[in-house]
């Protein structure tokens, strides 16, 4: 059966089924043998002598830090792996953004061919920023208010994942938490749990809540909201806005919300908060996380939205501060499907209880806004890493697979938020924090090493193990104000009223530009767009002049130096021709590739870029103090460890899928840009 399966798959591939651009969310082409009972296929493959492929992905792990930690014996399992097999830097994508890099990992293709270019893109009709990797469609409702189609992720990735190709060849794949591969693939023989890209029921990446008697007015922060909590005689009632209400017009949502109402009683002597939640009454000591609690919003007579969230008691003394996570998906009745098979989400809840499933798994926004304390954030990181470890180990122990891919993102988020605590040259470094947080990043690497050791204990002789990160990480000490530079150099022009006096507070930089005079503009992390006639809403640059203008901007920026010490600000700046086709509307015209500790100055979407008129470079004052996304990709490679020697030079992310299929003895589609990294000598 095994042989027949693979021959059938060969026919499909040579017939060109996989040579086109098949959206990842489409069902794989039917394989003739799939009509046989699944169990016979599994029996056949279990008898096969083939080794398995296990890939563990850790977001944003920096090779130089890994190397120095291995030298002093802090990562014994990775050290052992490098001696047994190999350790190399792993080439990343242009740009080194996670959605772009993980999509190249998953499809064995460059961004030019899979179509995901950035964390942030632009809406050329509205001249505003939008999400780069895709978007989420709200649920569709019948006339009677029942859901006819659940919310769904529309992913801009055009290419099939390597595991869906392996699945079509009869291999059983388990895919756990791989970032941005959402929605799940419709695998015949495998399973998938989606990670980044899964949103909350408010259709955000993560929108959390901080309730406190310290707040006098409601205020949003990036990724959440502060809500005043007036306390009278030790008691308060919180109204936490959950799912949007429907307007009278069927299918339309309005900007009001169904609220979760929680009564809170504070015991200042015991320093506890007792929460009367509709589901359950619980008491939390100060500094304690709650279990996950389900909430249901009755949106229509025929539609109840199930959701889960959990609380952290930040303060339960003189002041009361309570944090609540975003409203995540109830795995027993998912708002959007985030597993394959669909019932796998409930099976996981049966196994482990209700569980975190938001894609942006760590609330960096709340940490940045002082809505979540450091210790709570880090405890959540370690707990989440442990949950994913338990899942991966149990799925390995079950033994019913040929390929297992599991990913962790805690390494990246802690790198972003705690780099300043390990970098005494960082403007945000505080000596007093060092003992507690100076090794927060290293601690996640040690945790990673432990996970790897537990997986290594489970390997069989013929198994291939690869450890990868999608890119590295470095210090973000100074931010370059790209928008200001474009204005000062006459490429972008501010509206008349903005030029005189201070621009309005909180106005997005793009809203402050005069499009009739602006020739180039900046968006997101490191993207510059030309305001092209016929492409942009109010484009003024003729299409035939766009490339010359991009070259001119590149030429001026590339030689910029730091005023004080002559350090270069950019390692490289990439013209569109090096990462996308001319007619690709999702790609920018230039990607900046910062050098050293430089990144784009972050105005936080509040127009701060425009108010800062003096200095082009600003010291980083945010907790977000490590970065990689705007760096030149050659400066921030990821890591590759393998339990077998790597036989090619300059391995990169696109090679992992090709290596997997080749090691299994399967067919590597001709469209793959990646190459096999290890010898298959079995
Ligand atoms: Zn990152």
Image: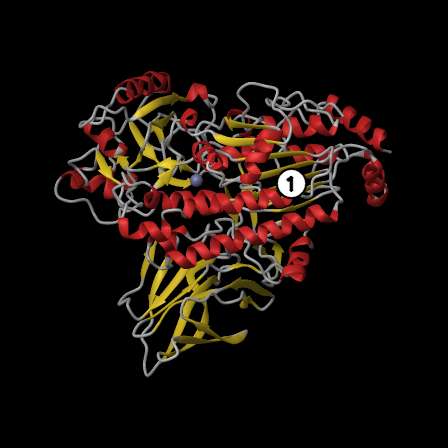
Residue at 64%, 43% (x, y): give it.
Answer: 455
Out of 634 and 389, give the one closest to the viewer: 389
Residue at 22%, 38% (x, y): give it.
Answer: 618
Out of 262 and 76, give the one closest to the viewer: 76
Name the spot of residue 101 as percent of width and height, x first.
50, 33
Q: Which residue is mark 1?
A: 456
- Vertical comparison of 490 with 382: above or below: above
Name the spot of residue 264 as percent of width and height, x first.
41, 76
Name the spot of residue 545 as percent of width and height, x first.
33, 17
Q: Name the residue at the bottom extreme.
A: 233
User: What crowding class fits label 1: few (fewer than 14 Cα within 10 Å), some (14-19), or many (20 or more)?
Assistant: some
- Vertical comparison of 573 with 602: above or below: above
Asked which secondary structure carries label 1, the reply is helix
Viewport quadrant of the C terminus: top right
Residue at 46%, 23% (x, y): give it.
Answer: 579
- Quarter of the rendered image showing ligand 1: top left
Out of 263 and 477, give the one closest to the viewer: 477
Residue at 61%, 66% (x, y): give it.
Answer: 302
């Amino acid at each position: 059966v095994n042989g027949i399966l693979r021959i059938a798959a060969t026919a499909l591939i040579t017939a060109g089924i996989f040579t086109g651009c098949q959206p990842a969310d489409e069902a794989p082409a039917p394989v003739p043998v799939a009509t046989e009972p699944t169990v016979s296929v599994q029996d056949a493959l279990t008898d096969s002598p083939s080794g398995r492929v296990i890939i563990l992905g850790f977001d944003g792990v920096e090779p130089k830090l890994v190397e120095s930690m291995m030298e002093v014996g802090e990562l014994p399992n990775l050290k052992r792996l490098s001696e047994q097999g190999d350790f190399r830097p792993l080439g990343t994508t242009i740009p080194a953004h996670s959605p772009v890099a993980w999509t190249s990992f998953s499809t064995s293709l460059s961004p030019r061919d899979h179509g995901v270019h950035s964390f942030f893109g632009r809406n050329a009709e509205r001249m505003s920023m939008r999400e780069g990797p895709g978007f989420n469609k709200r649920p569709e409702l019948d006339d009677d208010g029942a859901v006819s189609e659940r919310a769904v992720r529309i992913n801009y990735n055009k290419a099939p994942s390597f595991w869906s190709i392996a699945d079509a060849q009869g291999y059983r794949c388990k895919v756990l938490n791989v970032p941005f591969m959402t929605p799940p693939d419709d695998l015949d023989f495998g399973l998938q749990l989606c990670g980044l890209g899964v949103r909350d029921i408010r259709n955000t990446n993560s929108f959390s809540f901080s309730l406190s008697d310290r707040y006098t007015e409601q205020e949003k922060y990036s990724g959440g909201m502060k809500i005043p909590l007036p306390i009278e005689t030790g008691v308060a009632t919180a109204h936490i806005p959950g799912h949007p209400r429907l307007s009278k017009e069927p299918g339309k949502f309005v900007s009001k919300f169904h609220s979760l109402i929680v009564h809170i009683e504070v015991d200042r002597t015991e320093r506890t908060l007792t929460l009367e939640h509709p589901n359950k009454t619980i008491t939390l000591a100060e500094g304690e996380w709650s279990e996950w609690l389900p909430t249901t919003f009755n949106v229509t007579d025929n539609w109840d939205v199930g959701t889960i969230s959990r609380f952290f008691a930040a303060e339960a003394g003189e002041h009361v501060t309570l944090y609540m996570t975003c409203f995540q998906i109830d795995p027993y009745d998912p708002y959007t499907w985030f597993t394959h098979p669909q019932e796998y989400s409930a099976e996981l809840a049966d196994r482990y209880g209700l569980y975190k499933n938001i894609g942006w798994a760590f609330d960096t926004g709340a940490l940045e806004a002082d809505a979540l304390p450091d210790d709570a954030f880090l405890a959540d990181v370690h707990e989440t890493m442990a949950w994913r470890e338990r899942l991966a180990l149990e799925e390995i122990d079950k033994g019913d697979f040929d390929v297992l891919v599991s990913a962790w993102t805690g390494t990246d988020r802690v790198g972003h938020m705690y780099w300043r605590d390990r970098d005494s040259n960082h403007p945000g470094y505080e000596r007093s924090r060092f003992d507690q947080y100076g090794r927060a990043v290293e601690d996640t690497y040690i945790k990673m090493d432990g996970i790897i050791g537990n997986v290594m204990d489970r390997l069989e002789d013929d198994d291939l193990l690869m450890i990868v990160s999608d890119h590295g990480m470095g210090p973000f000490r100074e931010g370059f104000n790209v928008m200001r530079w474009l204005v000062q150099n006459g490429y972008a022009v501010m509206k008349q009223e903005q030029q005189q006096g201070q621009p309005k507070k909180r106005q997005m930089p793009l809203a402050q530009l005069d499009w009739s005079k602006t020739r180039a503009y900046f968006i997101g992390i490191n993207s510059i767009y030309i305001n092209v006639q016929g492409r942009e809403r109010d484009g003024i640059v003729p299409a035939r002049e766009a490339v010359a203008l991009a070259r001119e901007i590149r030429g001026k920026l590339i030689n910029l130096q730091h005023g004080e010490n002559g350090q270069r600000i950019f390692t490289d700046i990439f013209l569109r021709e090096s990462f996308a086709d001319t007619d690709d509307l999702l790609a920018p015209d230039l990607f900046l590739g910062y050098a050293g500790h430089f990144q784009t100055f972050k105005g936080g979407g509040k127009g701060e870029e425009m108010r800062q008129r003096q200095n082009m470079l600003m010291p980083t004052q945010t907790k977000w103090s490590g970065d990689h996304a705007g760096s030149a990709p050659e400066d921030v490679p990821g890591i590759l460890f393998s339990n077998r020697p790597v036989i090619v030079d300059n391995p990169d992310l696109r090679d992992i899928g090709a290596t997997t299929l080749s090691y299994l003895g399967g067919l590597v589609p001709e469209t793959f840009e990646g190459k096999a990294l290890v010898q298959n000598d079995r």
